[in-house]
Image (cartoon, rainbow, N blue to C red):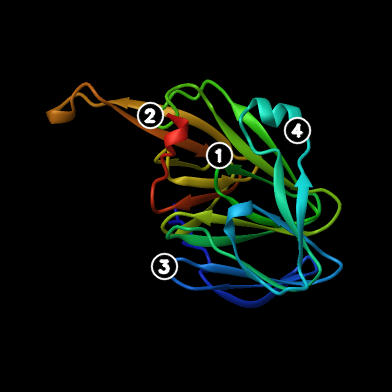
Amino acid sequence: MESPVLVATSTKAETFGGVTYHLDGELVPVLTVELSGSASVYYEHHILLWKHPSIVIGIKAMKGAVKRMMAGIQIFVTEAKGQGQIAFSRDGAGHIAAIHLKKGQELHVREHQFLAATGNIDYTFERVKGVANMLFGGTGFFIDKFHAVESDGILWLHGYGNVFEKILGAGEQIDIEPGGWLYKDPGVKMETTMQRLSAGVLAGMNLVMNRFTGPGKVGLQSMYLHMPSAE
């Protein structure tokens, strides 16, 4: 099996889906998006770093607001429109991964790692129950779903450490530490495996992994994420 491949850490003037963007920086990267007036981007409200004065900031309501509110998930995101540049940066070391979604494509992302997306990308979520592992305490967790319904678009994610991608063939599997996966294609199956350690100082403990089965791609982050809110 081939090892996961490092996703590009920087790019200059990359254009896709009618938007041009730049990725710069090493320890705490910055995403800069160029808006021409016909496109928009929405993002988590606390990640705005700087913008041109011509960029107008507003609120974008999310689908299923009542369901989202009951689940404790944000029901609004911030949206930028206009003509000029706007830059985003999360207050933490990591790696920004740009995912190009062609019309009809969908991507499943672990909660709390969405950074920004072009305005034509649909954003929904799903609660995954019954995943008994150390990370989520057996209570389940949320997966964000991003779907390019009508046209091509871009999704930007923040991974902790560095982001790697593994393309799985049909039936091919990889086991990932529960805090180490970032995203997956909808067709990739995820399940939890437990191995009982029976010798040494760790005897009686369980080795817990998330097993992913292809076909499709899986994103990994090299700094394990164990959100306090998930405990």
Give the SS element for disc 3: loop
Q: Is residue 142 above or below residue 116?
A: above
> Would residue 128 appear left or right of 100 to someone viewing this image?
left
Residue at which label 4 appears: 65
> Would residue 29 appear left or right of 79 to someone viewing this image?
left
Query: Where residue 110 sits: x, y (%)?
Result: 55, 42
Which numbered dot is residue 196?
A: none
Question: Are the residues tagged 2 and 4 within 8 Å (C-beta)?
Answer: no
Specify which label sits upstream in the sequence, 4 or 1. Answer: 4
Specify which label sits upstream in the sequence, 3 or 1. Answer: 3
Look at label 2 and name its amino acid: Met
Give the SS element for disc 4: helix
In front: mark 1 or mark 2? 2
In front: mark 4 or mark 1? 4
Give the SS element for disc 2: loop
- Quarter of the image where one finds residue 185: top right
Residue at which label 1 appears: 171
Task: For marks 3 and 1, give the CA distance.
Answer: 36 Å
Task: For marks 4 and 1, give the CA distance.
Answer: 37 Å
Which numbered dot is residue 134?
A: 2
Q: Residue at x 82, y 64 (%)?
A: 39
> Would residue 136 appear left or right of 109 to someone viewing this image?
left
> Would residue 198 appear left or right of 86 to someone viewing this image?
left
Specify which label sits upstream in the sequence, 4 or 3. Answer: 3
